[in-house]
Image: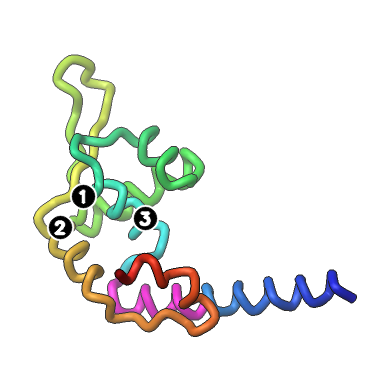
């Protein structure tokens, strides 16, 4: 019986996350995974490689690559080649990307009640 309560609670959390992600994507025109990459780039003091971004976001390398391509197509990031090793690619926020991150910092998407306790420290 306790196991079913756990499963139902996880289902409720999953629903809350799904609803939040849908609202987030509608407002900002990017997914949460794309936003996590933008956040990692914003918090970094140097150019980031796809490998670094994959590790920081816990996204698979192939999914990170896909997200980087999409963000580049949206004009939110800039890809540059390494000066020493031309095969190495680095990623930084574009001016539009920095604007989007600033826009996301003004919380326009309501956090579901079920998830609010997780963010009480982040709001201070």
Mark 3 secondary-structure assignment: helix
Using a 10 Å C-alpha cutoff, classify the residue at mark 1 as few (fewer than 14 neighbours), some (14 to 19) or many (20 or more): many
> Tags 1 and 3 in contact by the CB under 8 Å rule?
no
Question: x, y (%) of residue 112?
Answer: 47, 82
Gap between marks 1 and 3 measured at Cα: 13 Å
Q: Quadrant of the N terminus?
A: bottom right
Question: x, y (%) of residue 109?
Answer: 34, 80
- Which region shows up in magenta? 19-29
Using a 10 Å C-alpha cutoff, classify the residue at mark 3 as few (fewer than 14 neighbours), some (14 to 19) or many (20 or more): some
Relative placement, left or right, of 42 versus 35 is: left
Which of the pair 71/118 is nearer the observer?
118
In this view, 18 is above or below 47 = below
Task: State the residue position of label 1.
Answer: 77
Residue 124, quarter of picture: bottom left
Question: x, y (%) of residue 13?
Answer: 60, 74
Task: State the residue position of label 2.
Answer: 98
Task: State the residue position of label 3.
Answer: 36
């Amino acid at each position: 019986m306790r196991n079913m309560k756990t499963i139902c609670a996880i289902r409720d959390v999953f629903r809350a996350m799904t609803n939040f992600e849908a609202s987030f994507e509608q407002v900002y025109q990017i997914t949460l995974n794309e936003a996590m990459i933008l956040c990692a780039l914003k918090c970094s003091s140097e150019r980031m490689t796809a490998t670094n971004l994959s590790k920081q976001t816990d996204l698979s390398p192939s999914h990170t690559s896909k997200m980087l391509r999409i963000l580049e197509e949206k004009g939110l990031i800039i890809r540059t080649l390494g000066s020493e090793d031309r095969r190495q690619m680095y990623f930084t926020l574009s001016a539009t990307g920095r604007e989007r991150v600033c826009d996301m910092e003004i919380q326009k998407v309501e956090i579901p009640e079920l998830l609010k306790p997780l963010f009480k420290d982040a709001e201070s």
